[in-house]
Amino acid sequence: MAAKPTTVLDSRALARTLRRIADEIVELFDGVDNLIFVGIQRRGVQLSDRLADILDDREQVKVPRGSLDITLYRDDLQTVGPRPVVGPTKLPWDLNGKRVLIVDDVLHTGRTVRAALDELADFGRPSRIALAVLVDRGGRELPIHADIVGKRVDVAPTDRVDVLVSEIDGSDSVVLVRREDAA
Amino acid sequence: MTTPLGKDLLALEPLTPEQIRLILDTAEPFKEISERAIKKVPALRGSTIVNLFFEASTRTRVSFEFAEKRLSADTVNVAASGSSVSKGETLVDTARNLEAMRIDMVVIRHSASGAAQFLAERIESNVINAGDGTHEHPTQGLLDLLTLRDRFGTLEGRRICICGDVLHSRVARSNIWGLKKMGAVVGVCGPRSLLPNAIAELGVEVFDRIEAAIEWAEALNVLRLQLERMQAGYIPSLREYNRVFGVTRERLERAPRDLLILHPGPMNRGVEIDSDVADGPHSVILEQVTNGVAVRMAVLYLLAGGAPELADAAKGGSDR
Amino acid sequence: MSHRESGIGNRESGGNREQGTGNRGSGVRHGVLRGGRVLDPSQQIDSKGDLILADGKVESFETAAGASYGDDYEVIDCSGLVVAPGFIDVHCHLREPGREDVETIATGARAAAVGGFTAVCAMPNTQPVTDNQAAVGFVLRQGQAANAARVHPIGAISLGQEGKSLAEFGEMVGAGAVAVSDDGRPVASAHLMRTALEYARTFGIPVADHCEEPTLAAGGAMNEGIVSARLGLKGIPSEAEEIMVIRDILLARRTGGHVHLCHMSTKGSIELIRWGKERGIRVTAEACPHHLSLTEDAVDGYNTNAKMNPPLRTAEDVEAVRDAVRDGTIDLVATDHAPHHYDEKEREFADAPNGIVGLETALAVVNTWLVKPGIIDLTTLVDRMSVSPATTFNLPGGSLRRGSVADVTVFDATREWTVDPAKFVSKGRNSPYGGYSLYGRVMCTIVGGKIVHRATG
């Protein structure tokens, strides 16, 4: 199957988008008080850390950051099989009464976010949970929407949107891989 | 349904190093779940698991049961004494009856070597061997590997000595295969009457004296000495066993390095291991128990899944 | 010899022959096994020709072409086939009386015929034990009624095979017993074995011993070695067999009795038998097809159809036993045919019973693993499966000499077939050879001049 990747965001555009998301976070939460960043494994964690770094600089605080692996909360274990390795979940705070921002790379069906909400509920009762994603590619299967979106792209269900981050992939970018034989 | 581990976990001997590494890597994040306030994730919600124990074993059964419950599976414990097995029902009939009740997995402990494989060949459900006779006890082997790997960082080149009744020990066999596959150098030490005749052919170093084993090893896995071995004439007395083969503080103090001490439990304090060793600073016996739950969660989770090729596809996009 | 194509039932013209009565009912009173390779080691015959049977006996062997026979002679075309004195199995378990659900003397005798055996010796470990003349007579009568292979009873050494007091050898021999054995159990007491060897001399019968030192073998499920260490199964060391082998040989030396060692399985046993034979001690020994073909590796996966006693041993042992069959240290091949019910083998390995069925695969196994690779030739095969069993146990048959009983086996040494235990005539299905492709098929088995088995297709 031939696949032709096209760049949706290059590294400079990605950095710019993250700065804009950071602005919107401050706006949405009216500052960063009592706010915890939670990245979803895997690339949501790196994006969450970058956003938190930007805000650390800008607001002169240390924004607490955690990570969430939702593998065990998926509702499709029987159909897609286990991900071979489950990533770590790090939420070393009492979430009761806290404000939580979930950060993920791509929003698609909404099932990951649903699983993340379930998992967060097992850790406590935050006063507010919001969702920030780098890319919204449409195709929702659940009534879920993001509070903050970096970039919206309109793609066919068979297309793939990949977010690459330098910590894992060696470079920053968002690419669209179209399946040419999909039609 | 095939998984990265196949349908069943019956033994460590047939596993590849990659499969063992996968289980250990999967077990790592599961440790954290047991630290949470709500020690439960929904991964196996709706799965039915039968713990079929033909031999009494509180600690292994409880460990499996915690693992199952922390993954939200529905579990039923069947103990041989309270079941039709004691009325003379054969293992194959027991298996077919369980199958007819549409269960997803069976965890089996049995006094006959090969019983887990026997069951696995006859039912569709996943089968996990929780100890079969004197053959293997794979999850115990895995938790020992995890405990050692946590402490050593890697098992490659590490010298581990298994001490005691290797002849009758399923723990010993699973340890030997698992450790060797992970690159460790394995020794065994015990009275020759309690070592298999062909032990050297398994590719292990054999030590006749515990002092020599302690001098050589970086960790000792001290096996439980079943008290009935004395009645069966394999050793003259427990007192002499302790005198000659006991892992004591005095012996460990003469070692050129600190040794990690493992024991699969339950311990006979004052026989194969002295209390001040079992409770001492280098004992990782309680870590083994903690790791046991994580390893069993990992095995249950990996066996519960669907086709691995779909799992690979699932990795492509983060949100599906 | 002219080319005349015919099969059973065709009559051909020729000179007149006197009518006679076959010794086992109506059958081929007069018959010709035509054009086969007649192999009779008892007369050093290996040549193509016609074997003529009359009145249940061998009448003559004609190599001259163009021989003709009376029109009352049934002619069986044996071209391309081996014609040999009928095979004799001195060691099988027919389970009757007691376990008729597993095998009967009739089904066992028919299975034997399918395997080319014209006679079998039934071991006495039945329920109740064949330890008296009435029980021996029962086995004999059931065997005659089967109208298949001859069935020779073996009586027990000790009453109830309990290893305590001697059974009545004299009365059992009088009733038709051809040997005594406590097979299935070892004779633990050296004193009892000594007495049995001495007492059996009176009647000229061998004492067949299952060599197993009971305290060493206790609880064992397979050969002790690397495979038992891996599988976590209790092993039976070779020494459990060898200790009894040398004990029996020494007792035979002391008593002058004839000891026959059953199912030899280890290299050490072979060396000890060789030692005994070199000294002129009256020791004979048998090996089973499975110990000549399979190793302990067959047990892997807890295959209960590879569980037998003595157990399958190592490749080194198998090689030594094969070699002993070649050089005659092992006198004969016996099956140790041991049928078990399906349910009994369908269980945990340690709890499954010992033994496999062997009557219907014996020829093919020996042929495939020993003749085909050139370890022995067909003459030796016929000797070890027919001539030698007859002489060792003093049984009729084992020869195609004029006047011998017309017990004949006709087989195709090259025919390949796939073992399907479901098709066995024996009630037992417990064979480790299921699915194996083997060479050598019995085409026709004749007992006392009567065809008791003929291959279809």
Image (cartoon, rainbow, N blue to C red):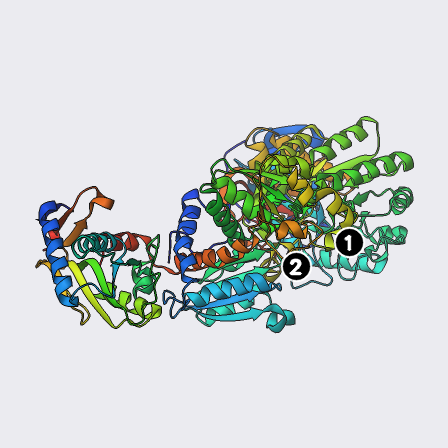
Local packing at callout 1 (Cα closer than 10 Å; few below 14, some 14-19, many 20+) is: few
Locate residue C137 relative to residue B72 in the image: left or right: right
- Residue extending furthest top? C278
Instruction: Residue under label 1, please give it.
Output: B231
Figure label count: 2
Is residue C62 visible in the rendered image? The answer is: no
Task: Report the front residue among B207 and C227.
Answer: B207
Task: Please report the residue visible at 29 percent of the width from the left and 52 percent of the height from the top.
Answer: B309
| Residue B134 spot, x, y in % from top left | 62, 52
Percent coordinates x, y for residue B215 in the rendering = 62, 35
Across and down, in percent, residue C407 comes to 68, 44
| Left or right: B120, with A8 as reference point | right
Question: In this figure, which residue is indicated by the disc labeled 2?
Answer: C103
Q: Nearer the viewer, residue C343 or C415?
A: C343
Can you tell which mark lies on residue B156?
Answer: none
Q: Is residue A23 left or right of residue C269?
A: left
Local packing at callout 2 (Cα closer than 10 Å; few below 14, some 14-19, many 20+) is many
Mark 2 belongs to chain = C
User: Do the residues indicated by labels 1 and 2 lie within the same chain of the protein?
Assistant: no
**Percent from the top left, x then y, of residue C75?**
57, 43
Question: In the structure shown, which secondary structural element does the residue marked by tag 2 occupy?
Answer: loop
Q: Amino acid at mark 2?
A: Glu
Task: Give the image quarter of residue A148.
Answer: bottom left
Q: Amino acid at mark 1?
A: Gln
